[in-house]
Amino acid sequence: MPFREQEELALWPDKPREECGVFGIFGHPRAAEVTYYGLLALQHRGQEAAGMTVSDGYHLRSHKGLGLLADVFSGEQLADMPGTAAIGHVRYSTAGANTLANAQPLSASTYRGPLALAHNGNLVNAQALRTWLERQGSLFQSTSDTEVVLHLVARAGRESLVEDVQNALSFVKGGYAFLFLSESQLVAARDPLGLRPLALGRLGDAWVVASESCAFETVGAEMVRDVAPGEVLVVDASGLHELSPALPTQRAQCTFEHIYFARPDSDIDGWNVHAVRKQLGRVLAEHHPAPGDIVVGVPDSSISAAVGFSEASGIPYEMGLVKNKYIARTFIQPAQELRDIGVRLKLSAVRSVVEGKRVVLIDDSIVRGTTSRRIVRMLREAGARAVHVRIASPPYRHPCHYGIDTSARGQLIAARLSVAETCREIEADSLEYLTVDELMSAFGLQAEQRYPFCNACFTGQYPTEVYEPAEGREQKHVGSVTTGASRAGRAETALVRAAVRGKETAAAELAAQPSAQSSGLAAVFSASEDPAEDQAAALQRPDTAGTVRVAGVEKRR
């Protein structure tokens, strides 16, 4: 995901955007074609760029471009990419960063040979690491945080590619699902909290990995299991190798995957997305009933919740809104005074269904509120007598730092206004949301349990330290984990300071931290004037059991 340069005014501004989808396969004679179809199943996760890298065992061939998969790939291009292993990527971007240089997979020539990397997620300490790498002489070709990982892997100098990857992962923190491809290996890795989804499947003798299980259904593969948080998988000619995390992990899966992002036919970490959304609707009807004649869901992600609300309330479900599936995201943006026309291009009310009716409008979330207001107006113009809005999630008050593109907090309507004020702002007759405990009850979890989900966008309680841009290209520490700052967390703060203030200052700060020596952080920013010595100290530190790593789970325990 690119570093955010400015806020995008999108035509569909009331929805967060998933940044990416990844797909990989090893051991199939038509790897490129299978990857293409797998990515098509993940197109909802990214529609602004697409790419693929294929290995024939001797060379890597890559092709990527801006736009939908159908815009980027043709049958001839796929035919020119022979091989038995591949990784692919579909991507969203923020304004100003949708460039070919940021399209993935990213590739590099290393001392081991060519290496490609595809990434879904966001690394919260990427800017600090990038600054340090640049001061050590690394040259970056993109503004993507993914390239930071590529540099860390290339510099590691361990005995094998997987050790290089594990060493690089010990530096980064945030949410990620990584796919690495060399000439002879496919390596997959999921972040220690399980923030971003990743699943493992089998297609004949081939192994496949994907952001969502719906991709397996498309290519005819069988779902094997979810990749565990912190797990690294290696696939090569000898088969599948599963490397479990060194220490137990504490899950913090992204709730919004189930609320909005994932396809309803996907299974993520043991929960079917459609079933969860339908249960959210039932919970919504139980705790937040509304007087209505019909229930209408906002297409497409709210349909399951609307059906659940209808079944629980006894109010009939009707298709009162229709989405135009043939309007591309990239069509000409209307001027502000014509923006309502732009909304109607994508969504229209069915007058014969809503006219004279009290409508219970079910939506999965409200981000800025602008589109919600236009939908309410649209229903009234189509003759609805009343519009009662019910949201199948809590108020969205805090930005995501783990791979979801949302507005700055000041632009989130729930962060600025109360529920009553928001109701007036969107011009609804009533508005109610789920609470966090009600949301969790849809997963069968009780209020007294520790929830294995990240609900930071609702609560502001982030499962890792988080950073925001300060002056220039620096980063400042602005958030903390729910368990508070640990010794390793303070050492990590010194890591960020090191990247922006220099190694000499950082070395002194790190020396004062009890966890600095065990974590290897002091070696990262030693005062050596020799870059080769710095690299050796920083990237070849011991990886023994019990080590407090830069992004390790130990810090969060």
Image (spheres, helix red, strand yellow):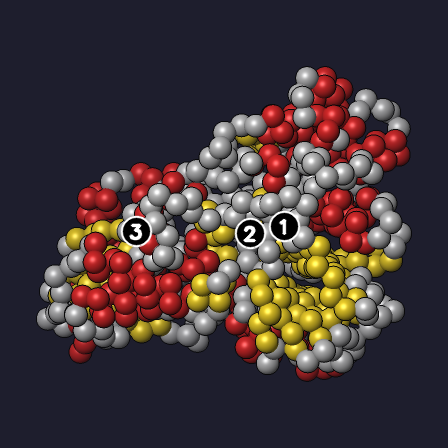
Q: Nearer the viewer, residue 107 or 459?
A: 459
Residue 537 in the image: above or below residue 412: above
Amino acid on which disc 2 is placed: Gly
Q: Badge 3 is on which residue?
A: 438
Q: Badge 1 is on which residue?
A: 230
From the top left corner, tell me how far across and down residue 299 is, in percent.
Answer: 34, 68
- The secondary element bearing badge 1 is classed as loop
For disc 3, the neighbor class at 10 Å (few under 14, some 14 to 19, many from 20) is many
Q: CA distance from mark 2 to mark 3?
A: 22 Å
Residue drawn at (70%, 22%) of the image = 510
From the top left corner, tell me how far across and down residue 210 is, in percent.
Answer: 60, 66
For disc 1, the neighbor class at 10 Å (few under 14, some 14 to 19, many from 20) is many
Residue 377 seen in this snapshot:
no
Mark 2 or mark 3: whose residue is earlier in sequence: 2
- The secondary element bearing badge 3 is classed as helix
From the top left corner, tell me how far across and down residue 236 is, in percent.
Answer: 79, 66
